[in-house]
Image (cartoon, rainbow, N blue to C red):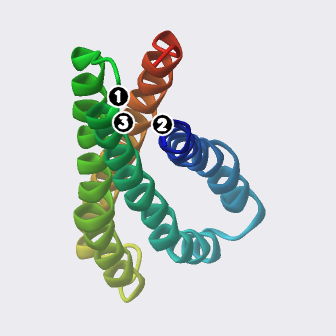
Amino acid sequence: MQVTLKFLYLLSIILWIGSIFFFSLIAAPSIFKALPKQMAGDVVTNIFPKYYLISYVCGVIAIFTSLLSWFTATHTATAVYILRVVILTIMLGLSIFAGGVIRPQALEMRTEMRSLVEDSPRYGELQNRFNTLHKTSVLLNSLVFLLGIAIVFITAYNIKE
């Protein structure tokens, strides 16, 4: 059972941070380079629900398997398990906030901006708010990624578990 739990735990972490790495550093920049801005925005908007779903599912699986491993372990490295669960919970919380709060607000701004003339005062206001939301989203995404790298390090450091 421990091997299955470790496998599911590691797979969830790999898929989670791998999807962040691929989307943020390869897919999104390539989409915006290859397509006109509005079309690229449409493509990325279509990807986001699936992208965040990966985070949610992987986060829940990672937390669940980490907790189950802790409770079924023959030895108890309590501090390591607590640290992993705390970091994973923070990662999942940040992902839920980015996907469930920031993304809908940014989508609303983007939709309203498309109905306005670019040089109108309202457009400029919405553009500023959208940029702030986008920066917040990038920051949260980066933090989740860095915490994921920390989880990989903690796991590698305690590989004997």
User: Where's residue 105, x and y in %?
Assistant: 25, 70
Q: What is the C-alpha distance between the residues marked 3 and 2?
A: 6 Å
The disc placed on residue 69 is: 3
Q: Residue at x 31, y 28 (%)?
A: 84
Query: Disc 3 residue type?
Result: Ser
Left or right: 58, with 125 as reference point: right
Image marks 3 and 2: residues in contact by CB distance under 8 Å: yes
The local secondary structure at tag 2 comes to: helix
User: Where's residue 131, x and y in %?
Assistant: 34, 54
Left or right: 12, with 115 as reference point: right
Q: Identify the residue under disc 1.
A: 73
Q: Identify the residue under disc 2.
A: 2
The local secondary structure at tag 1 comes to: loop
Image marks 3 and 1: residues in contact by CB distance under 8 Å: yes
Query: Disc 2 residue type?
Result: Gln
Image marks 1 and 2: residues in contact by CB distance under 8 Å: yes
Q: What is the C-alpha distance between the residues marked 3 and 1?
A: 6 Å
- Front-most of 115 and 52? 52
| Residue 29, above or below 48 | above
